Image: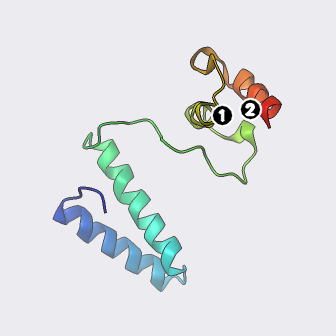
Amino acid sequence: MPSWTSKDERRFEKIEQSQRKRGVPRERAREIAARTVNKQRRLEGRTPNTRTMGTGNPRRPLEARTVNELRNRAREMNIPGRSRMTKAELVRAIRERR
């Protein structure tokens, strides 16, 4: 686990248990709980980076992802000039690299 406080850990456990009662599989419940706790930490300013580090849900089309998610994907693909690209340009560049 990340450097959570005891309050964060309690919140995680409570959310996980709530999800399990709803019939969500254990791993998915843990993921939901961790994302919820981390989002709260981010909103409170307790994390160093407020931007997402992920590349978005791979099942969603590129147009449905955020610019930050597209930039992270472009970084993984070593696309030059990505920081100055618009969302449409990022989508085009990623599709061309596939």
The amino acid type found where label 1 is placed reads Met
The amino acid type found where label 2 is placed reads Ile
**Residue at the far left in the pictured view:** 6
| Left or right: 80 as drawn, with respect to 92 | left
Instruction: Name the one closer to the observer, 27 or 63.
Output: 27
Look at 50% across and 75% down and name the residue there. Answer: 27
Look at 79% across and 26% down and name the residue there. Answer: 92
Q: Position of residue 50 (x, y in %)?
A: 38, 36
Q: Position of residue 89 (x, y in %)?
A: 73, 21
Would you identify the image quadrant in which residue 42 lies? top left
Look at 34% across and 58% down and name the residue there. Answer: 37
**Residue at the far front in the pictured view:** 78
Q: Quadrant of the N terminus?
A: bottom left
Instruction: Name the one closer to the observer, 30 or 19.
Output: 30
Of the two numbered discs 2 and 1 on the same chain, state the one appearing first in sequence: 1
Report the number of numbered marks: 2
Tell me whether the residue at label 2 lies in contact with that at label 1, contact meaning CB atoms closer than 8 angstroms. yes
| Left or right: 54 as drawn, with respect to 18 | right
Look at 29% across and 67% down and name the residue there. Answer: 11
Residue underneath mark 1: 77
Residue underneath mark 2: 94
Q: Is residue 33 above or below residue 39?
A: below
Q: Position of residue 5 (x, y in %)?
A: 18, 59
Mark 2–mark 1 Cα distance, whole angstroms, equals 8 Å
Instruction: Name the one closer to the observer, 89 or 13.
Output: 89
